Each structure stands twice: as structure tokens, then as C-alpha cells.
Amino acid sequence: MLGAWLAAGLFMTIAPRRFGNLVNESFSLFPVVGAHDWGKKLFVRLVGLGLLAFAARFIWGIGQI
């Protein structure tokens, strides 16, 4: 599960346009992300960074055990 959070967070941070369009084509939950849609890309990147922060917190908790 930790690997999935890391992979999704990295994918969202590195390629927000591809991730947004993948979600749009698969589930129709997110509008199409164009080349100049900086707001949508920023939103996807922030969510990706949130997933990476959650994974880091999870890793930190495991390290404390």
C-alpha cells in the first residue's frame, strides 16, 4: 500500500496532465487537462504532494517502532 501511495504521488507530481486525463478517461471524475490549464495541473500536483507527505508520515511512523 505504501508503494501505491508513493507511485501515485510521484505520478501526480511529475505528470499532472497525464494523470488528470487518465482519471478523466477512466472515471470521468476530473475535467480534461489541457496544455495551458495551470490551475488543474496545480491542483493535481498539490494532491500528489499530499499523498507523498502522507507516505512520508507513514514511513516515519514505521521507523519509530
Image: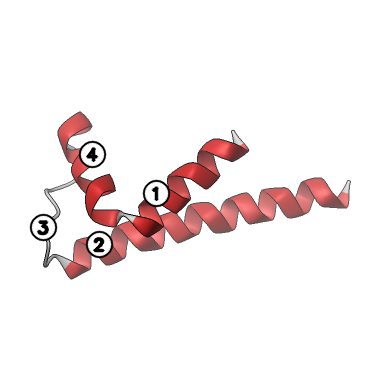
Residue depicted at x 57% and y 58%? 53
Mark 2 or mark 4, which is nearer the start of the sequence?
4
Of 35 and 59, which appears nearest the observer? 35
Query: Whole-Å distance between the Cαs marked 4 and 3?
Result: 12 Å
Q: Residue furthest right?
A: 65
Query: Whole-Å distance between the Cαs marked 4 and 1?
Result: 11 Å
Dot label at residue 11: 1
Question: Does residue 52 appear left or right of residue 30 in this picture?
Answer: right
User: Please, what secondary structure does the residue beneath circle 3 have?
Assistant: loop
Q: Quadrant of the N terminus?
A: top right
Residue depicted at x 79% and y 45%? 62
The residue under label 2 is: 41
Circle 4 Cα neighbour tier, 10 Å, few/some/many (<14 / 14–19 / ≥20): some
> Is there a contact, CB below 8 Å, between mark 4 and mark 2?
no
The residue under label 3 is: 34
User: Please, what secondary structure does the residue beneath circle 1 have?
Assistant: helix
